Amino acid sequence: MQQIIPFQACWLWLTEHSDCILRAGSIDTVVYDDDHWCFTEEDACRLLVQVLRGKRPMTELFIEPAHIALVRMAPGESGAFNFNLFRNPNSRR
């Protein structure tokens, strides 16, 4: 069963469950868990997700919450959940 949740609730869950994340991506790219996920705020308008190996960043993803219209949470494989972020069609990018 799918559920629509606010982006802020999704972000809060991710920050509190960083050890539960296996992969993140888009249509073009997928980033797999290496060692550790780190969630921070770059500034008031941009959030940063890093995949770290030890202390070295392997990948960085930037998210601009103003461009996210909704988050759809759906059951995935083997008891996992998928969080799909959908772009706000009114955003400029």
Image: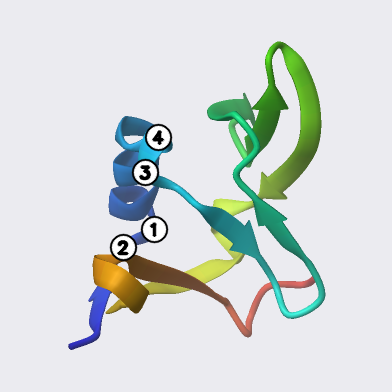
**Residue that label 3 marks:** 20
Image position of 21 with respect to 84: above or below: above
Tell me where residue 5 sits by quadrant: bottom left
**Residue that label 4 marks:** 19
Mark 3: which amino acid? Cys
Give the camera-side residue of 5 and 84.
Answer: 84
Q: Earlier in the sequence, mark 1 or mark 4?
A: 1
Badge 4 marks a residue whose secondary structure is: helix
Mark 4: which amino acid? Asp
**Residue that label 1 marks:** 7
- What number is the disc on residue 6? 2
Q: CA distance from mark 1 to mark 2?
A: 4 Å
Contact flag, marks 3 and 4 (Cβ < 8 Å): yes
Image position of 56 with respect to 72: above or below: above
Mark 2: which amino acid? Pro
Mark 1: which amino acid? Phe
